[in-house]
Amino acid sequence: DSAKQQAAFIAVQEHYPKSPPKYIGIGSGSTIVYVVASIARLEPSLIASTKFIPTGFQSKQLLLTHGLEILDIDLLPVGEIISVAFDGADEVDSQLNCIKGGGACLFQEKIVAVQAEKFVVVADFRKVSKTLLTPTTWASGIPIEVVPSSYPYVTAKLTALGATQVILRPGGKAKAGPCVTDNGNFLLDAVFPTLAEGEDVVQDLAEAIKSIVGVVEHGLFYGGTRGWKGRPEVAYFGMED
Ligand code: DER
């Protein structure tokens, strides 16, 4: 983990604003823990007047433990922007398109990322692929948040779209039945064949998934010729020790 720690430290040094920011976005997962630890050690004047916007329960608890001021995303005044949002990722391709949602917070993460002036991802070097859905990097597919009553229909449409496996994410040991997100929705993990190279390949799949009735949001954070939906501007990869 020292590699993740190093990558997080560098990402904060290089992208945390040099003058006190009003709002900073904080993602979810294990790598973000190192990002917040680095932020908490910054010069106090850089964080004392800043509100930190979490992307889920774990993210909020992390900020609380570091005594950083919290602002829920629904309290961000209309028209205000987040200076920088930091987050992790499950897979990152050569154009920095990402798959996110391993932690089931993808909707909250994306609604923060798209309101940030700059989106910075910190990930383990093992998350890097040439193109997304490379099974040796990330084999769980694309997390897709769906309205619970629609999951059978969305499953069928994803299969028609080329998904080779669509799993309703189980609650595991946490609860009988499926995982339920902070927004009260279900998660489908949809495995597709490894994507080809190409500027709009991720964008094409993202738009096709988003157009299925019942889909709330999906874990593709991407850019393309038809617009930008959450692709990070920069990513840092903790290198092997
Ligand atoms: O769910 C997410 O997108 C999170 O950012 C998470 O996947 C990051 O993973 P990590 O625990 O390896 O940082």
Image: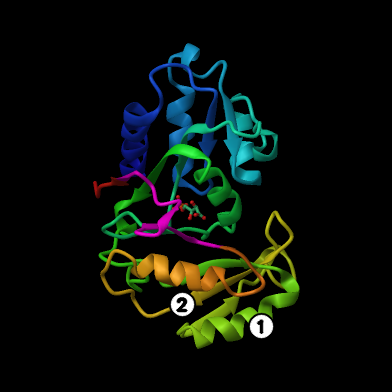
Where residue 162 sits, quadrant-wise, is bottom left
Q: Is residue 49 left or right of residue 240?
A: right
Is ligand 1 closer than 8 angstroms to the Cβ of mark 1? no
What x and y, as percent, mark residue 31?
44, 45
Q: Is residue 233 magenta?
A: yes
Q: Which mark is residue 189?
A: none
In the rendered image, which residue does mark 2 sit on? 191
Residue furthest to the front in view is 226
Query: Over which residues does the magenta segment extend?
Result: 218-236
Q: Is residue 208 left or right of residue 18?
A: right
Q: Which is more toward the observer, 123 or 193?
A: 193
Residue furthest to the top in view is 45
Q: Which is more toward the observer, 37 or 44?
A: 44
Q: Secondary structure at mark 1?
A: helix
Looking at the image, is 136 positioned above or below residue 55?
Answer: below
Where residue 14 sits, quadrant-wise, is top left
Q: Which quadrant, please, contains the N terminus?
A: top left
Looking at the image, is 148 positioned above or below residue 70?
Answer: below
Crowdedness near tag 2: few (<14), some (14–19) or many (≥20) residues, C-alpha within 10 Å: many
Q: Secondary structure at mark 2?
A: strand
Looking at the image, is 139 positioned above or below residue 92?
Answer: below
Crowdedness near tag 1: few (<14), some (14–19) or many (≥20) residues, C-alpha within 10 Å: few
Residue drawn at the location 52% of the way across and 33% of the way down = 82
The colour scheme is rainbow
What x and y, as percent, mark residue 27?
52, 44
Identity, as a three-letter code, of the amino acid under mark 1: Tyr
Examine the residues drawn in magenta and state their main secondary structure: strand
Q: Is residue 103 left or right of residue 221?
A: right
Residue drawn at the location 53% of the way across and 41% of the way down = 115
In the rendered image, which residue does mark 1 sit on? 153
